[in-house]
Amino acid sequence: MRYLPLTTADRTDMLAVIGAASVDDLFVDVPAAARRTGLVSLPAHEGELEVERDMMALAAKNRAAGAGPFFCGAGAYRHHVPASVDHIIQRSEFLTSYTPYQPEIAQGTLQYLFEFQTQVAALTGMEVANASMYDGSTAAAEAVMMATRVTRRSKAVLSGGVHPHYAGTIDTMASVAGVEVVAQDPAVDNEAGVIAAIDADTACVVVQTPNVFGTATDVTAIAAAAQAAGALLIVVVTETVSLGLLKSPGAMGADIVVAEGQSIGNGLNFGGPYVGLFATREKYMRQMPGRLCGETVDAEGRRGFVLTLSTREQHIRRDKATSNICTNSGLCALAFTIHMSLLGEKGLRQLAALNHSKARQLAAALGAVPGVEILTPRFFNEFAIRLPVAAAPVVEALAGQGVIAGVPFSRLAGGMDNVLLVAATETTTTSDIETFARMLNGVLA
Amino acid sequence: MQSVGRPTQPQAVSATPDTLTGARGLLQDEVLIFELGGWDKTGVDLAEPELDASDLGDLVRVEPIGLPGLSEPETLRHYVRLSQKNHAIDLALYPLGSCTMKHNPRLNEKMARLAGFADIHPLQPQSTVQGAIELMDELSHWLKTLTGMPAVALSPKAGAHGELCGLLAIRAAHVARGDARKRVLVPTSAHGTNPATAAFVGYLVEEIAQTDDGRVDLGDLEAKLGPDVAAIMVTNPNTCGLFERDVIEIARLTHSAGAYFYCDGANFNAIVGRVRPADLGVDAMHINLHKTFSTPHGGGGPGAGPVVLSEALAPYAPAPWIVHGEDGYSLDEAPAGAFGRMCAFHGQMGMFVRALAYMKSHGTDGLRQVAEDAVLNANYIKARLSPVMSAAFTGPCMHEALFTDAWLEGTGVTTLDFAKAMIDEGFHPMTMYFPLVVHGAMLIEPTETESRNELDRFCDAVLKLASAARSGDADRFKGAPFHAPLRRLDETRAARKPVLKCPPPG
């Protein structure tokens, strides 16, 4: 077996050193009733060649996004990732290392986490950021929990623009923590609708921009309303590239910003692994969940980095911790950091502008298809359209013709069967857009 | 004499001067990208946008963001230099107890990067991702068969997230029968995530005592079980590296009190293929794919923590559920009975691909051998080190060997000092001061992917250090490490006045 270095002779010699007659003697503490003598009923081992063949057969049954025109967004976006990103994250020293608990031999990991935190703080316009969460949705749920700790209140108000999967994740966590969730009905452009729902029990208001329908909103007034009532404003961003073009949540008064960082450095991967961004004001730093990397010096006074403020965390505080999170999303954060370093401010702004331009082209093309109505008033790189018929069958029909037309809203929640969410990125070509518009016209005709 | 091109020979020198630049030979003193990058520099070449952003009015971000850029060669150099400051499994044995730092097969990486897995969207039409859902179903089959459990929730993104999932299922089951309960019992030796998770779900956490031989104290468990106990959370094999001999009785007592048995499956590697948790009476158990099933730890994630569930808990599993019907595979996003959802989308697909490639590589025969070799390697280390170091418990261990610091008494060397000196000898330290139930714990987990040669190299190094500690050479330990990229770091200073980012350019 190629992953097992011990030989039969090694095993015999080692048992002799241990003083055991057989390996079974080492399992003597297992109750007899639970000892399995035979093999579990599963296939036997395979060579690399055979495994590769099996896996490629499964992969071949999927239609890759890059195989043709593709317009899905709704929380996961197809962007081009530079080749050097994937090369660096596969270096053994990054791929096969553990959480940097021994900082003297983990400065590589710690320094990139420090760079990551700085980049995330800059992007979101916030004072501090952590070293990543699992993804945007779990980060959003953690943000709600954090707001209840900060405010000692127990109600969360969610706008109708929050991604339904995010709302569902928040709802699941909140339900057990005794937090009441007041979720507004899905609405294309009504973030300000949350203001009326704020009361003296409200711990936080959760809004998303661009929201799940693609609508970009200036949340300054919502922030002011929330803060006037003693609540925190949580801003959710599912498309991080938008921060290269749109006003930062921090500049609009957000107290906590959570984002899905997949768009930078990470592929679609059918939904995971992704990387959650989490940023807040410095005064709430000690209430943050997750790992934090901080600057310090070594015994000779040289700059170095360590995990810090771990008295918030489960391995020290156990049942008093701010969160139970342990493993986060280190390697995806590295991919994010490398890609962001390659982009720089100049590249990010251009990437964002290009995404926006492609989406405007797409809107112009789809808006010209008879029966199609563009619903989203201001968008970054995705928007919602209303079709004259249910969206899901149309998407299926177009998939049969080689076009992945977007995400029917009905995949996420009930009630808007004719609404289709479509996104364009720098990977979308003019020809993709023309093909989509032509085929949609054909299906609707 | 003309010496160019002739072989050279080192000259004797009396002292080692500091370098003039801060570099240490090939190890560069690398600054932050914020001190390196240009504000008008980029490492990507993108097309010009055809349309502008005039439609967005004052939503447009005008002020500088604060993100420096680098060209591609500078980026490579920066991150490759950083990489060289890390220890890694591929460099040497990485004996972190409770972490299962095994070899990460590169075939898994290659498979996860196939466009048919890496470049598919979680919400594209299900008719176009039949292979992906089939893969999830096949992974489920392997996990269910290896554990003997009837159901599995794949979506949890890490071990602690799996614990959360398991407790949410347990809570839902209690609520469904109108019997909401208040307490969760956790042994003193548990991972910190266990009490943190239970508290997060709103339960009061109560500790169960441990016996002198490192197992759950049955008498204490029985005394604390009662009609308000929702669950016990027991790690098996436990964090002392021992199999809970009375686990079947623990399950019986728990069930007869109307509570559920949550098993922390962090140490499943020790028993995979030899013991099925279902046969022990387990109701829910998370499986860290990044431990037992070899997906890379990646410097702290991403992981994956699928949770297997018993018949009693399966109806409450979170969305999505995999459905295999006449029309093929589909994902049900709103199944009746589900307690909710753990995250957006369907879980860590990239990790599912790697784990399944690993399982297929080993097969049922190889996986059983994995457990046996993991346990053999740990016992070999225990046998070689026990004559000098103080083993915490007698008898065979499972996949990890636990020592106390009793053998260091009077040397002036602490567990921490000893660990830092191991760095100088080229090894990552073992897990220190965990579990909390023994004094100055040193927990060593070699895994099955270490050769006899590497095990001996490790044991020889530890034994040499041990004899140095005992012969009064305390300075070697107090100041260690001396030969790492940095000397010991000031963690107190970092926490006192936290600096969590590079200051903005001024």
Image (spheres, rainbow, N blue to C red):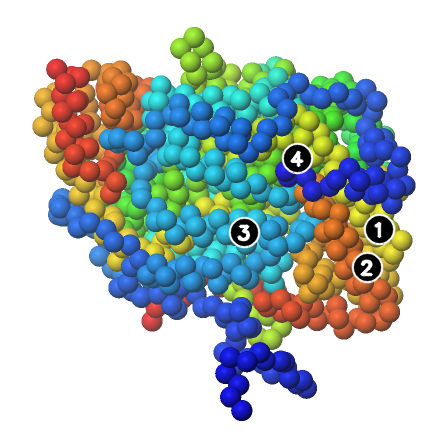
Identify the residue at horizontal 41%, vertical 21% (top origin): B130
Q: Secondary structure at mark 1?
A: helix
Residue A61 left/right relative to B18: left
The answer to whether the residue labelled 2 contacts the one labelled 1, judged by CB atoms less than 8 Å apart, is yes
Identify the residue at horizontal 39%, vertical 23% (top origin): A61
Name above or below for residue B499 compared with residue A61: below
- Quadrant location of the C terminus of chain B in the rendered image: bottom left
- Neighbourhood count class around disc 4 (C-alpha, 10 Å): few under 14, some 14–19, many 20 upward: some
Of the numbered discs 2 and 1, the one sitting upstream in the chain is 1
In the rendered structure, find residue A92 and report the number of the disc placed on it: 3
Identify the residue at horizontal 67%, vertical 84% (top origin): B12
Q: Same chain for marks 4 and 1?
A: no
In the rendered structure, find residue B463 and report the number of the disc placed on it: 2
- Neighbourhood count class around disc 2 (C-alpha, 10 Å): few under 14, some 14–19, many 20 upward: some
Where is residue B33 shown, x and y percent of the image?
40, 64
Q: Same chain for marks 4 and 3?
A: yes
Residue at numbered disc 4:
A1
> In the image, what residue type sits under mark 1?
Arg
The chain identifier of the residue carrying mark 3 reads A
Where is residue A268 shown, x and y percent of the image?
38, 36
Residue at numbered disc 1:
B384
Q: What whole-number distance in Å separates the C-alpha atoms at marks 2 and 4?
A: 31 Å
> In the image, what residue type sits under mark 2?
Leu
Q: Nearer the viewer, residue A235 or B441?
A: B441
